[in-house]
Image (spheres, grey):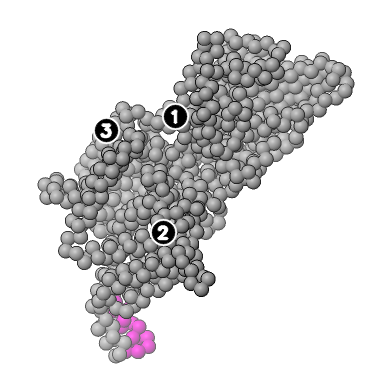
């Protein structure tokens, strides 16, 4: 990881994520990227308004200071020269508590624009959702506007309009200021005109809105009661949003969200009207103590969201996060999550803190203390029982909570916040001690998790040695014994599958279906050993041998059939022995004592999309580990929105790695019928089955053969296109499902098709 990458993760990436989340939520809310850009601009500008306001105040302070000292400086420059002038000026500056470096204070607002512009540029210049979408006079938000032509040359109006508004705003803002301040703003306006002239209309439109906001802000500063005027406008907007949501009712959740937004916009006016009657909370204490508490609070949040939560996910199954094509320690992802978290909670929160006034600093110290408490409570207590999570940080089942859990969580947050405010105000030394102890504890647990992940990673060198392509030998004259274990296959679905496809049933003519069977356990490690080795390897029988390790007993079960058939003269082939050496990717070295046994790992060997999927998986994990942490520590009522069906509000970019077939990595399910994208875990196993005819060798001999093949196609449920049951980018099964619901009831027994998981399970079993 280069130094520039670290700077990007610390400074730009947190802003880019904030922009992306706001845009994604807004786009889902208003269903048009043009309106989403407007909401993004307003949201970001209001969020950073205190920052810009303080920066402007610092600029005014610096300018007033310069004006006050100007006469004295001019006198000294005329009176003295050389080293004597330098010494006299330094003395004069020191007497007036001034330094020439203070001139940088006047450029704070200018410097602030750079990271915000870079974040907006990276997002809005590459969003797929903007491509080909019109908005008012803008024909394509994903391309330069080119609204008219002059002498055959297209003229981009938005950058020109943006520059004009910027100049007007600068004229209003710099009225009465020295020429230096005016030149600075005019040069910036010219720079953005040149830089953004050929940029996508969506980006130019966003920056145009920012300039409009800046102009309105400067006009507001000239008003007698700017705060009250702004509160009134906010309340009017809130009322309009509420009325619009009630009269244009679409579905309940959107109406509720819009009403909450509208109410939030009305609150500033209510607070303004009754501020004299509200109780005043006084936070006493030295600023130094508050600063220490604030810094510790930022570090606590960084360690929790950047290290502990992601490392806990990695520790649960390190091998799932190691790919043979990009073979690296999974702890690498923690560098990204940690630096992004540090950028958010230390760098940017710290920057806000540095620019804040003393009362605001005390309030920010209190807020970070309360936020840390809410974070740890939500992570430790709430959001449990969400089911299995895959290596893309997507749960098998949809994340949803009922109203009761949301209400309980809000009440707990309110109670905890009240207690923590009391502790902060009355027991001033406690927060710093608690935060420091918490940082040490969280860091210790994170290091322990990372050591475990590294140990597991160091034991995966065998992955690079198992690269041979399988060849499955059968004979025309000898006996062919084939055992195919379909991990997580559901036998009770077979009647419905055969009912739906009679041709499939005819292909199984001569086979025996045993309906009254059940696995010895609900997980592979409990149920597979008895299938592989018989009744001597049931969970009960294995537990009787309590002096032996589970890995040794599992390996022994995996050898039973291959060794028995080998000793009886069979040509033996074993593919993907599950949990071999207790590894996620089977360790074929357990058969080294039997060199005659041919062993292969087949999963992923025939997935032509694997390279592009692996590259995009890397990008997603580098982003989503931090997003997953925020999802886990957020209030329950916000978790569904932050999770966003496993996308974590990620918007598709034109810079994304795409396969030649233009298939999206990871599947997003919208209902029980439709989805977009394909899961690589499914393709890694499914493509083995589709390539069986290519890797099977049929020899004209009397040699007996034995084949054991494990395949995890049913273990990776996803939506497939019916009735072919094939993976594809866009799946829409609504018409087919409505017309063929009868297949779920066979011989009086009805399958309970309650939701996505049931439909996906049926479809991957059918495949």
Q: Left of 183 or right of it: where is 745?
A: right
| Part of the protein shown in magenta | 80-95
Dominant secondary-structure state across the stretch colored magenta: helix
Residue 505 position within the rendered picture, expressed as x and y whole percent measured from the top left: 66, 16
Could one spot residue 492 in this view of the protein? yes
Q: Sequence order check: which comes first, mark 1 or mark 3?
A: 1
Could one spot residue 497 in this view of the protein? no
Q: Sequence order check: which comes first, mark 3 or mark 2?
A: 2
Tell me how far mark 3 sits from mark 2, CA to CA.
Answer: 48 Å
Residue 642 position within the rendered picture, expressed as x and y whole percent measured from the top left: 41, 40
Q: Which residue occupies the foreground of this view, 517 or 521?
A: 517
The vertical placement of 518 against 667, above or below, is: above
Task: Answer with the quarter of the image where residue 767 lies.
Answer: top right
Kindly report which numbered mark, 1 or 2, lies closer to the viewer in this rendering. Answer: 2
Residue behind mark 2? 137
- Residue shown at 40% from the left, 36% from the top: 640
Residue behind mark 1? 386
Residue behind mark 3? 411
Residue density around tag 1, few if under 14, some if 14–19, many if 20 or more, within 10 Å: few
Residue density around tag 3, few if under 14, some if 14–19, many if 20 or more, within 10 Å: few
Task: Answer with the quarter of the image where residue 460 lies.
Answer: top right
């Amino acid at each position: 990881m280069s130094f520039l990458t670290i700077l990007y993760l610390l400074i730009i990436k947190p802003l880019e994520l904030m922009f992306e989340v706001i845009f994604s939520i807004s786009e889902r809310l208003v269903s048009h990227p043009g309106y989403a850009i407007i909401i993004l601009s307003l949201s970001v500008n209001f969020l950073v308004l205190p920052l810009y306001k303080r920066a402007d105040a610092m600029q005014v302070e610096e300018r007033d200071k310069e004006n006050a000292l100007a006469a004295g400086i001019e006198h000294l420059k005329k009176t003295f020269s050389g080293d004597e002038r330098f010494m006299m000026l330094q003395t004069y500056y020191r007497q007036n508590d001034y330094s020439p470096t203070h001139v940088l204070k006047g450029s704070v607002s200018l410097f602030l624009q750079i990271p915000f512009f870079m974040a907006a540029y990276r997002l809005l210049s590459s969003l797929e959702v903007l491509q080909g979408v019109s908005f008012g006079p803008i024909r394509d938000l994903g391309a330069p506007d080119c609204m008219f032509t002059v002498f055959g040359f297209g003229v981009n109006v938005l950058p020109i309009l943006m520059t004009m508004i910027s100049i007007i705003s600068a004229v209003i803002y710099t009225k009465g200021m020295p020429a230096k301040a005016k030149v600075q703003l005019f040069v910036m306006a010219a720079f953005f005109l040149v830089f953004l002239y050929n940029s996508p209309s969506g980006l130019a439109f966003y920056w145009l809105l920012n300039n409009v906001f800046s102009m309105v802000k400067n006009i507001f500063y000239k008003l007698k009661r700017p705060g009250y005027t702004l509160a009134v406008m906010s309340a009017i907007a809130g009322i309009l949003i509420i009325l619009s949501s009630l009269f244009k009712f679409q579905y309940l959740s959107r109406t509720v969200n819009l009403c909450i937004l509208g109410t939030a916009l009305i609150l500033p006016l209510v607070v303004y009207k009754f501020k004299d009657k509200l109780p005043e909370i006084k936070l006493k204490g030295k600023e130094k103590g508050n600063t220490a508490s604030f810094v510790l609070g930022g570090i606590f949040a960084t360690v929790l969201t950047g290290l502990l939560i992601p490392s806990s996910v990695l520790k649960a199954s390190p091998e799932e996060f190691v790919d043979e094509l990009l073979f690296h320690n999974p702890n690498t992802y923690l560098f990204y999550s940690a630096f992004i978290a540090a950028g958010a909670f230390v760098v940017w929160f710290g920057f806000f803190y540095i620019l804040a006034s003393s009362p605001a600093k005390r309030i920010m110290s209190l807020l970070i203390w309360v936020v840390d408490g809410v974070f740890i409570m939500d992570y430790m207590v709430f959001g449990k029982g969400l089911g299995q999570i895959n290596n893309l940080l997507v749960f098998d089942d949809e994340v949803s909570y009922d109203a009761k859990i949301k209400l309980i969580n809000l009440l707990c947050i309110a109670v905890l916040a009240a207690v923590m405010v009391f502790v902060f105000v009355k027991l001033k030394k406690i927060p710093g001690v608690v935060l420091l102890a918490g940082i040490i504890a969280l860091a210790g647990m994170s290091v322990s998790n990372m050591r475990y992940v590294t140990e597991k990673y160091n034991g995966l060198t065998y992955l690079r040695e198992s690269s041979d392509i399988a060849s499955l030998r059968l004979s025309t004259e000898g006996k062919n014994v084939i055992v195919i274990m379909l991990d997580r296959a559901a036998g009770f679905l077979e009647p419905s599958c055969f009912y739906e496809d009679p041709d499939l049933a005819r292909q199984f003519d001569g086979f025996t279906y045993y309906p009254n069977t059940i696995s010895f356990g609900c997980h592979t490690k409990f149920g597979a050993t008895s299938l592989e080795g018989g009744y001597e390897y049931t969970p009960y029988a294995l537990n009787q041998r309590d002096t032996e390790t589970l890995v040794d007993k599992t390996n022994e079960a995996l050898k039973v059939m291959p060794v028995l058939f080998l000793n009886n003269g069979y040509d033996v082939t074993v593919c993907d022995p599950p949990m071999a050496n207790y590894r996620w990717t089977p360790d074929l070295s357990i058969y080294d004592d039997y060199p005659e046994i041919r062993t292969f790992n087949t999963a992923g060997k025939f997935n032509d999309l694997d390279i592009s999927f692996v590259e995009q998986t890397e990008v997603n994990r580098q982003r989503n580990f931090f997003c997953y942490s925020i999802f886990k520590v957020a209030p329950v009522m916000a978790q569904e929105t932050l999770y966003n069906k496993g996308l974590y509000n990620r918007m598709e970019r034109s810079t994304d790695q795409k396969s030649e077939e233009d298939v999206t990595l990871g599947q997003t399910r919208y209902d029980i019928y439709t989805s977009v994208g394909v899961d690589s875990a499914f393709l890694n196993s499914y493509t083995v089955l589709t390539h069986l005819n290519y890797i099977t060798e049929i020899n004209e001999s009397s040699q007996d053969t034995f084949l054991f093949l494990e395949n995890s196609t049913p273990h990776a449920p996803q939506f497939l296109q019916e009735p072919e049951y094939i993976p594809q980018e866009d799946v829409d099964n609504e018409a087919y499902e409505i017309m063929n619901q009868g297949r779920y009831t066979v011989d009086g027994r009805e399958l309970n098709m309650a939701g996505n998981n049931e439909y996906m399970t049926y479809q991957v079993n059918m495949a």
